[in-house]
Amino acid sequence: MEPFTQHTGRVVPLRRTNVDTDQIIPAVWLKQVSRAGFGKGLFAAWREDPSFVLNQDVYRGASILVAGTDFGTGSSREHAVWALTDYGFRVVISPRFGDIFRSNATKAGLLPVVLPGAVVAELQDLAENDPAATVTVDLDARVVRYGASGEAAFEIDDYTRWRLMAGLDDIGLTLRYADDITVFEQTRPAWLPTAQQA
Amino acid sequence: MTSPPPRTLAEKIWEAHLVRATPRGAGGTVPPGSVSEPDLLYIDLHLVHEVTSPQAFDGLRAASRGVRRPDLTVATEDHNVPTLGVTGPGLPLSGPLSPVTDPVSRTQIETLRKNCAEFGIRLYPMGDAGQGVVHVIGPQLGLTQPGMTIVCGDSHTSTHGAFASLAFGIGTSEVEHVLATQTLSQRRPRTMAVNVEGALPEGVTAKDLILAIIAQIGTGGGQGYVIEYRGEAIRALSMEGRMTVCNMSIEAGARAGLVAPDEVTFAYLKDKQHAPHGEAWEEAVSAWRSLVTDEGAAFDHEVRIDATALSPYVTWGTNPGQALPLSGAVPDPASFEDPGAAAAATRALSYMGLEPGTALRDVTVNTVFVGSCTNGRIEDLRAAAAVLDGRHVAEGVRMLVVPGSMAVRACAEAEGLDRVFTEAGAEWRGAGCSMCLGMNPDTLAPGERSASTSNRNFEGRQGKGGRTHLVSPEVAAATAVTGRLTAPADL
């Protein structure tokens, strides 16, 4: 995973709430067996509308998506994260995220940032009034900087922040505890099912 | 000696699976400096399907890692398989005799088969007697048991919580993590009690109950929580009904739902293939009886639902929280206080092609779908068949009945339900996710409108441009008869 410390980019304002992962990447796109190329399917149905925000030239190349509350609800498909990163997004900002989406994002190098609705609206206004405006997301300092003096702190737990900043492989981290896992396994009740028995 | 502090059911299961716990208050000792690590949770059962696993197996190969516990891993083919022409095992994946005509789906199924063979994972393939929707086959095989931790790369894993197993959906990176380590690194969730007081009135089902719960707490209301469903109405539900309720926990934003086990749970599990037998059964039941929230244990949040006030529910919009009693009318977006909710309602009505004030009973459909991990079990098919018996699907309406598994299909056929459906003019299909999500041949065409027993009415969920109304199996069947959203009592 590519380390994430700080990112400066332009903003795509997505003024919608309840953006479920079926909208981010429709199911017909989920049949690929690799992680690559999902950007083409990002918001596939909405992009058919020429006025959809991603189709506006002024937002081309923007790397921070700012959306309404409950972003990434619904299906657990990590393909939604892969679609966003493949398209070029590094950060998504919303007042609230679907739990599974948020977890998936931090495993795949996309930073989910929770900010209050008022700040989200301010960032969307900024991007609509001046699409060239840049916003800086500083994971190290846990703060988003925008406009002349705008600054909003966000919360992220120490461990996730550290893991993202170091770009660490979760599995490698867990395998440090392989012995603990083995010890735990010896305590499991004998009646628990296995796929092979019966 | 002091007695241990009272704990919720969720906390008991969580604590019984801690390989490593975050030191409370102190923070961990992971470099650099003090970084508080999440808990490391052992996973008792990992369910795998063709859509969210290929990239995880690739990741294992790239890192030269194996599957730690293939014996705790079970796979099936459900999401993209066709439901026509799949009547038994051993069907070819390609050629003129193959039911799979889409080459991309074929590749995904082939990939799962290769991965399962390479890593020694038990697979129930298309057409096999054990095949079915992943959340239908776990309970049916007796693999889902109280007190377990269960994960799957599918958000409806919450279904298994009906058995008091802590079960939740994960993404593909976490699928790879579980394959490699049989654990997950997780923050301890908060706990929410949904207390359903009183009894459900006659004709009101588990589906109506969960739609009403989601409408009350909202699609994000359960975010960060494990919900425990409690109260008289929950106790009165069958295991199938409890699974329907827990299944849609994720539609309220909660990764997991739980119901404490009782005699109904034990009776369901007894003699199931993978359930404990003999002395082990007695030992297990005795342990399972302790899986209740202790008197005095505190939840982080509590919600109260009056079951006696409920009636059949139906969704009118494009998220599962946009639901109302069937006796109601399409709402006016101007009536919403919250501007975000009003904007979402405006957008939803435009997508759904509905006008404010229209009676929901006047909304006409051209497709009815009975199936899915929400309502594709035998009890659901019995309920739909009971309504259809002696009646006929309205002209111009297509009705698909898709059993949740090949075993449900066989059971329904033994009871003669398939004949009830076909004589009523419905299509009787093979097992799979089918029209719940538009990634197999069963889809809505643009502009088509369905009454569906599935779990999501998102834009395009059942096919691009398709419009979905979520309903119970009973309402689905009654709707098929009239062609309008209808409760059985209206017939």
Image (tube, coloured by chain):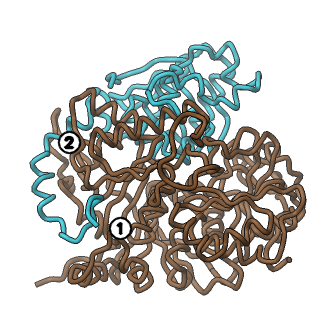
Q: Residue at x 49, y 41 (%)?
A: A77
Disc assigned to residue A174: 2
Q: For mark 2, does the 10 Å Cα neighbourhood hold few (<14), some (14 to 19), or many (20 or more) residues? A: some
Does residue B171 lie above or below B234 as drawn? above
Q: Nearer the viewer, mark 1 or mark 2?
A: 2
Residue at which label 1 appears: B10
Closer to us: B178 or A51? B178
Chain ID for cyan: A
Task: Name the image quarter holding residue B196.
Answer: bottom right
Which quadrant is home to the N terminus of chain B?
Answer: bottom left
Q: Position of residue B128 (x, y in %)?
A: 46, 55
- Left or right? Give the position of B13 relative to A72: left
Q: Secondary structure at mark 1?
A: helix
Task: Name the image quarter holding residue B103.
Answer: top right
Which quadrant is home to the C terminus of chain B?
Answer: bottom right
Q: Position of residue B31 (x, y in %)?
A: 15, 34
Q: Colour of chain B?
A: brown
Residue A28 in view (yes/no): no
Residue B6 in view (yes/no): yes
Query: What amino acid is at disc 2?
Result: Thr
Q: Residue at x 63, y 69 (%)?
A: B207
Q: Position of residue B272 (x, y in %)?
A: 37, 74
Q: Position of residue B458 (x, y in %)?
A: 67, 47
Chain assignment, label 1: B
Q: Secondary structure at mark 2?
A: helix
Query: What amino acid is at disc 1?
Result: Ala
